[in-house]
Amino acid sequence: MTTETTAPSRWTHQLITRVRAADAARPWLWDGALTACWTVAALVDASGGWRNVARHPSVPAGLVVVLSLALSLPLYARRRRPTTVLAVMAAAAFVSEASGAFLQAAYLQALPLFHIALTRPPRRLLWAFVLLMAPAVTGALRFDGETWHIHVTSALWAYLGVALLGITVRSRRDHTAGLVDRARRLEVERDQEVRLAAASERARIAREMHDIIGHNLSVITGLADGGRYAAAKSPERASQALDAIGTTSRQALDELRRLLGVLSAPDDAPSAARAPQPTLADLDSLLEGVRKAGLPVVSELPAPLPPLPPGAQLTVYRVVQESLTNTLKHAGPGATAAVRLVAEENAVLLTVSDTGTPSATAGQGQGLTGMRERAALYDGTLDCGPLPSGAGWQVRLRIPTASAPVSAPEDSRP
């Protein structure tokens, strides 16, 4: 039953769409066909039928033909210049009414009136009705006597109906155009949101890759350098360095696999599979790996560890990791580091310092930018700079214990 009722409607809609497309592509074809049709009808009426309604049947036939053409041929330009067309037709209608011919072709003035209501400002309709009603009133007063109002009223209602039809079509068209415009704006906004989300995701992935690869490569480099120096004097220590390099490499690969696995997982994957790693509980293993790389690290961690959301724990871990990585790369030989984590009343304070000599480019790398972004994500603050003594570098991170992601929920990401 539904198919039977909707199929004709669908066919009608397709037909209307095709007709509109053809009209938009070749407007002259439709305008010419309509003008030719009404011109033939007007000339047929001018051949003698006009006398059936004429008040003065003795009007010259030549004048009737001229008036019929003047009331039909201008229709070709009704869509481009409806007001001009109506003025020309109104002049012919005035002669028709004043002479008593009362040609029915005068009602063709409804066509330019429709286009005035459809495309022109509303005030144009006032002038249009003046042009339309002046001939009708003139003919009615001259030939209809006391019943003049009947002719005027019928013409007035006919033209009012046409004007209201044009206004209705215009309102529906404007409403549809507004909906289309709104849909386009929403589509543009959605595209912008998608691009912003993609850019944010690329930045997050780049930050994770930087932290994972940069830190582990720095540790591996330190281990390799230490193993090279130890190979000649202590083969056993060189073997330990190689074992540490293998362990660090495997840890880096595991973290990369976990990151890529989460990125390729569907959005409805279980939250446990998307839990961020590592956490504060992994700080000890991180510090141990740095010590094996040759950097002495003193740590002060509270027991139990502060109750932070998983994403905030990841932020603390990455800040420690990045800070120690920078120390390995820039602090120089003989440097030491200290990591201190303090649980305050409403926040957690992390301090990572070293005794090395700050490089000229300290504080300008992408790693520090990533640390600041992580801190801001959880409403935290991060300060870094040289120690007051001038020897050494310090990173201070403060994160509220009840912190929640300010933008994207990173606590559900690696």
Image (cartoon, helix red, strand yellow):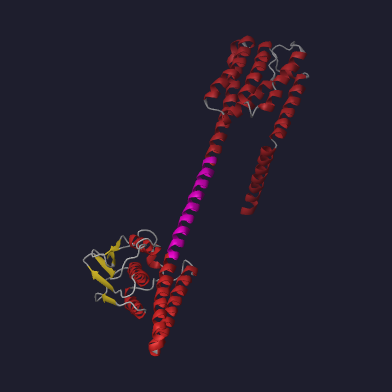
Which x, y percent locates residue 242? 42, 84
State whether the magenta stretch is mostly helix, strand or loop.
helix
Residue in the image at 32% along x and 75% along y? 283
Magenta highlight on residue 205: yes
Q: Which one is nearer the viewer's eye here, 186 or 177?
A: 186
Give the magenta range: 177-206
Which x, y percent locates residue 373? 36, 61
Q: State left or right for residue 206 relative to residue 74.
A: left
Residue 55 location, quadrant: top right
Residue in the image at 54% along x and 37% along y? 174
Specify the quadrant that holds the C terminus: bottom left
Instruction: Please identify the residue farthest to the left as the structure is shown.
Output: 345
Q: Which one is nearer the viewer's eye here, 362 or 206?
A: 362
- In the rendered image, is residue 252 in sight? yes
Which x, y percent locates residue 324? 34, 71
Magenta highlight on residue 227: no
- Above or below, 257 against 130 in this view is below
